[in-house]
Amino acid sequence: MLLEALTSTAPSFPSFRRQCPTTLSCHVSFDGLNTRRNPTMKVTACSKVESSSFPLEKKRKVVEHVCLLKAKQVLSDKDEKDMLDYLYTSQYQMRGIVAVSLGRISNDNVENYTHAVFMRFQTKADVTKFYENPFYSKVLKEHVMPYCHDLVNVDYESEVEDDMLPIFRKGEEFNYGVEFVHLFAFDDSALGAPVEDALASLEKLRKEFPSLIVQSTQGSNFNLSSKEYTHAVVTRFRSSEAFEIFLGSTEYRDVWRSKFERIIRKTLPIHFSVDPVGKEVM
């Protein structure tokens, strides 16, 4: 029986209806991902969400950019703030960037990445111009690389709901939460139908957790200069608790074991907290 975990204060969604609640116990542990929280929790849960008869929502293509940084051990709080401020405010200096979130990575990871940057663009051409922009090159040279000794970039095309708030990631529900970035390197023999099936199964599952997830995108990495990872998934959770519930759910574990484990060569899951910048909505 497929369960959808719900928080007690979750807002109502017009396209879904809830059924009788039960109690679900979640144990959080995923590929070495350390959430640094109590691994066992109890949550209110309901049976599978049933979609309504509303017409399918229109979609808009977007291009997602992920950059993971390895900061030097001697990075001070002041230098860290300077680096992140320049990266965040670059959206106001260059055209094409429609959304940004970034922060210090919360979990330990095998690659020892310390910070993550997520940017959304309208088109692939905008991403190309972004890499070539003198302002961005200056930000990297003067405000990022002096504090970091390595980075990796992943770019992919995806789709979101064709509406201003989800496209630009504006509104109260994007103001807080946890950004979960999951990079994959699939076996060459699995590229094609097996990978598409795995990602489709994960997407289907995410849609059954609307009270936990604000938005999620996924796609194939088209960055020719950084092919260490073949695919990426970026998911915004409503809270750290929602993040833990989803990763600890039986449904998620079943999808991972049955669809991903056999075709994965390398995987890198990281997450960071999202907080509003001043009084502005991110």
Image (cartoon, rainbow, N blue to C red):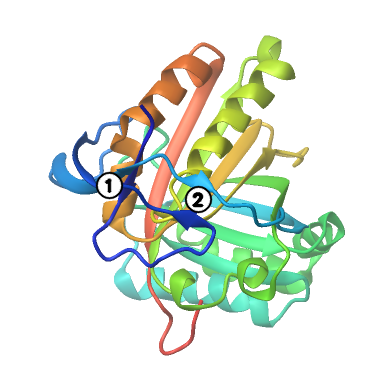
> Exactly how many numbered labels are in the figure?
2
Q: Which residue is mark 1?
A: 20
Three-letter residue code for mark 1 = Cys
Res 3 visible:
yes
What residue appears at the point 49 percent right and 55 percent down from the top-left corner?
16
What residue appears at the point 73 percent right and 55 percent down from the top-left corner?
63
Near mark 1 (Cα within 10 A), the count class, few <14, some 14-19 or many ≥20, is few
Q: Nearer the viewer, residue 150 or 269?
A: 269
Q: Which residue is mark 2?
A: 235
In the rendered structure, which disc, 2 or 1, sits on the residue that comes first in sequence? 1
User: Residue 53, image x and y in percent?
Assistant: 64, 52
Q: Nearer the viewer, residue 77 or 248?
A: 248
> Tag on residue 229?
none
The alpha-carbon separation of the residues under discs 2 and 1 comes to: 27 Å
Q: Is residue 236 above or below residue 23?
A: below
As helix, strand or loop, the secondary structure at mark 2 comes to strand
| Horizontal arrangement in the rendering, residue 52 relative to residue 148 (left or right) | right
Three-letter residue code for mark 2 = Thr
Q: Quadrant of residue 132?
A: bottom right
Q: Nearer the viewer, residue 23 or 261?
A: 23
User: Residue 264, image x and y in percent?
Assistant: 54, 18
| Horizontal arrangement in the rendering, residue 97 relative to residue 175 (left or right) | right
Q: Is residue 118 above or below residue 186?
A: below
| Horizontal arrangement in the rendering, residue 158 relative to residue 248 (left or right) | right
What residue appears at the point 56 percent right and 14 percent down from the top-left corner?
263
**Does the CB distance between marks 2 and 1 fall below 8 Å?**
no
User: Residue 222, image x and y in percent?
Assistant: 76, 40
Res 191 visible:
no
The N terminus is located in which quarter?
Answer: top left
